[in-house]
Image (cartoon, rainbow, N blue to C red):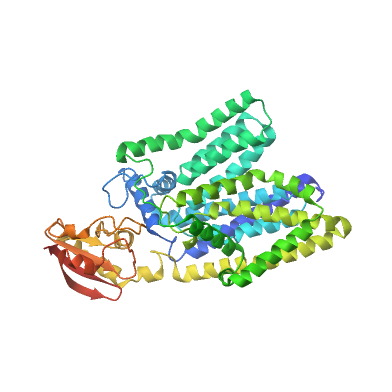
Amino acid sequence: MMNPSDPMALATKQKLSLLLLALVGVVFVLLSTSRYGAGLSPDSVGYISIARNLIAGAGFVRYDGNFPTVVWPPLYPAVLALVGGIFRTDPLLIANILNALVFGLIVYVGGLLTFKHLSSFPAFALVGAFAILFSIPLFSVSVMAWSEPLFILFVLLSFIFADSYLEKNDVTSLILFSSSVALSCLTRYLGVTLILWGALIIVIFRRDSLKKKIATLSLFMLISSIPLGIWLIRNYSVSHTLFGSRTSSPNTLFQILSFVISSLLRWYIPRKIVDHRSILAFVIAGAVLFTGLSLKGSWQSVKIALRQISPAILFAFVYTACLVITSTTTAYDRINDSDRLLSPIFVSLTLLFLVLAQAMVEPYRKSFSKKIVNSFMIIVIAILLAYPIGAVILKVIDLNQMGQGYSSKAWKGSETIQYLIQHQRVKPECTVYTNGPDAAYILAHLAVKKCPARTEYNFPEVANDFSRLSGSWPEESNACIVWFDKIDRKYLLTIDELKAVANIDQIVRLEDGAIYSVTRK
């Protein structure tokens, strides 16, 4: 029988523990999405429609079908299409299964990182794996049909292969490192931050000759950049833009920084505390003071510990800095409106907190019983995890009962959607315009046109004088408008504004919307 203290036996136990946590993560996502499917946002509808068109042989085209898609990289919809094609299943029906499996892999790979960097404190490392399983941002993006979970998985694999490359300095590790970075770029355009991060890893952390660094850096840049480069050339050839049309950001640097800080705090601290500034200031001041006093006299060990996770910390810094800078010039969704944009740095931040906590208790483990100190720290961390654990469990229950986004109970039971489904004759009788083309497509299976816009998306300034539409819109002689009351897109013209440029008459008023006929003035 193998000795329990044997390193191989311990490693096996760790992997089995992580496998169990990964399976729990898969079950959580499947429970959340079993009744209504993966959560659907406008981006989700875009991914699903592209996957369907890929299966149909139409290429990377969205539900509007008017032009090839360039605003998103190809990998996530391509994976949906591949799985859907193999199993002859609609990508909409497999999105939740795919994301459940990816979330399980995130928990497993993230757990490998915690055990690697907290090897002297295995029980503490396991608590870190629990923190990843019950991560508010990671779980939140994994129950949506979004590309973030796949992107985060490639980020974590990049961490694993970067560590392997720094330890072994061999070509195989470098190729795996470069390939994971390349795949991240094909999943999210912000993956380009990993190319910069990887280059810094090679330049800063390898003690090689200048000649070897140049050769290594060249190979890394070649492998990590070529796939995205090919896609960008394709984008330019079909749209004369690299990333699609983008509008300027309406937010200042100070606003964006406040969004970032607020979002990060809500991952670990209840919203009521974050929103109550005086209590939040007291909590942060107490945490900083306690940390400073606890680490006093052990800065050398802290430096050693931080050096081990410095690639992960560097990624969090590079990614966040690039996100903040580009958010001042490009109109993303607001950072604090969801966990999407910042979620890739969660594991890096959690590793940082855990390593600092380990350094704080290390002196006490030498002075007192290790068992007592370990138990005390696990209890403290468990108390701190009570908030995210409770938040994730409540989210699982809520999503199972109500769903999320366009796949929610409310949207599927929408009277306007039901009317469209029951009156499919609307489509051949007139050209349909709507303020919710994504909702009409994914729920009522209608290919429709978007109502005219007042401004560019997410942009505060007027982009066109809509009075010029008078006499020219709609182009069709027989058109109608499907208006969803629950969709609030301020960049689109309202019904009252459209009445100023066209003849609009109500056909039917529904509980959550209306159908109008529309002709040119």
Residue sitting at x 63%, y 47%: 313
Residue 399 against residue 90 in the figure, above or below: below
Query: Across the whole image, how many numbered discs are drawn on residues?
Result: 0
Residue 210: % across, % down = 63, 25
Which residue, as the protein is rendered here, is positioned at the far top? 211
Residue sitting at x 70%, y 44%: 308
Residue 127: % across, % down = 69, 59
158 vs 39, nearest the viewer: 158
Residue 20: % across, % down = 64, 56
272 vs 438, nearest the viewer: 272
Image quadrant holding the C terminus, namely: bottom left
Let me know if residue 362 appears in the view. yes
* Left-right relation of 226 to 442: right
* Left-right relation of 192 to 133: left
Residue 425 against residue 207 in the figure, above or below: below
Let me know if residue 184 appears in the view. no
Residue 5: % across, % down = 82, 49
Residue sitting at x 53%, y 57%: 257
* Left-right relation of 188 to 461: right
